[in-house]
Structure formats: structure tokens, C-alpha cells
Amino acid sequence: MGSKSWLRNLTLSAIAVAGFGVVGGQTAIQATPALAQLTQTCQGLTLFGGVESEYRLGYCLDNNSRRNTRARYYLYVGGRTFTRDIIELQISYPEAFEEERGHFNNATIELREGTGRGGATIPISEVVVDSDRNMIEIYPENPIPGNRNFMVVISSVRNPNNFGVHNFNLDAMFQGDSFRRFVGVWPLDVAAQ
């Protein structure tokens, strides 16, 4: 084998191993030369246990370190999970989140269209954060059409003191219903760095 072939195979092997580490892991660290290091946690690969795949919702967390007061949660809702217009969203989170001193006291909450970091903002008429019941209720100004991808973006979250997997549950009230229905779960790896 020539030296060029050997070098190419070695390079491809290194890329394959690095790719497996990113796909198999749950944490990705990005660095830019001119800026401080940014940390980001996204959903990972679950081999055994966890939330059933049909109910697992995607997410991405910025500034996901312990006790960070600038954490930002991108909670994705895929249009395939519902076919009717949504008039209300309710997110419930576990008591352990607040027992570890995590909270949403200074958080700003918005809805964005699309995927990734989101596109246009979806106007909200009211947001209620009830820390006694561990719930966040979001009321959009207009119903969110069925089969539309959107996300809930929660900024300025105070992360808990210690790492934990916290299941944030999403219930939605659909146009014409009088009660909320379960949509899915975000199994968040909070305070992972």
C-alpha cells in the first residue's frame, strides 16, 4: 500500500471514530477562536430504556453548565406529533429540577416556527410560570396550525446545582377540545458540563 493510500485510510478512520463519538455521545463542544468557548447539549442516542421513541421530543441546550443563569432551552415540537390546531401548551417539569435550585424566575419564553434555532416568532398572548405546580403554560395569540414544526425557546434559565436527566412533559389543548392531551417528553440532560 502506498503512502498516499495509507494516509487516506488513516484520515478516514479518524473521521469515522470522531463521527461515532459525536453521534454516540450527548454533548458537543464548539469553540471559536475569537469568542469564549460555547457549550451545547443536544439529544443523544438512547440504546436501552428512556422515553419511548414515539413520545421523545428533540431539544438542544445552550450554556448547559451547573448553576448557569444564562442557560437557553430549545424544545422542539415536530408537526408529525399533531394534526389539529393547538390553542394552549403546558410544560410540566419534575420537582427535582427546583430542589436542585433550578428555576425560571427570570426566564423569557417564546415560540418560534421551524427547526434548528427557529425562524419567525409566533406571537404569544400569555405565559404563566407556576413554580408551585412545576408548570409553564403558554397561550399563543392565534392557534398554531397542525403539522407545523415549531419550538419553545426558554432563555435565562437558572440551571440546577447538579447534573440530572429531567423529563419535561408537553401537553397541548387542541382547537375544539375542552381538555389537554399528552404530546410527548423532552428528556433533558440538564447541567451536563
Image: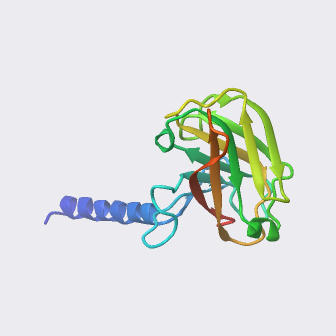
Q: Tell me which colouring the rendered structure shows.
A: rainbow
Q: Residue at x 50, y 62 (%)?
A: 44
User: Residue at (68%, 48%) from the top-left corner?
Assistant: 35
In percent of the image, x 63 and y 28: which residue is there?
Answer: 120
Q: Is residue 167 left or right of residue 129?
A: left
Q: Residue 85 location in percent, x, y?
A: 58, 32
Give the camera-side residue of 105 and 129.
129
Q: Is residue 137 above or below residue 121?
A: below
Which residue reaches farthest left? 1
Query: Viewed as shown, does residue 40 lie left or right of 106?
Result: left
Foreground of the two, 66 or 92 = 92
Numbered circles on residues, count: 0
In front here: 32 or 23? 23
User: Split into 4 quadrants, where in the image is the N terminus?
Assistant: bottom left
The residue that appears at 67% across and 50% down in the rendered structure is 73
Quarter of the image for residue 132 reads bottom right
Which quadrant of the figure contains the C terminus? bottom right
- Foreground pick, 98 / 133: 133
Q: From the top left corner, tell me how far across and down residue 11 is, in percent.
A: 31, 61
> Height in image: 71 above or below 18?
above
Spot occupied by residue 14 in the image (x, y as percentages of width and height): 35, 64
Residue 180 rendering spot, x and y as whole percentages:
65, 46
Name the side, left or right, on which 114 lies relative to 65. left
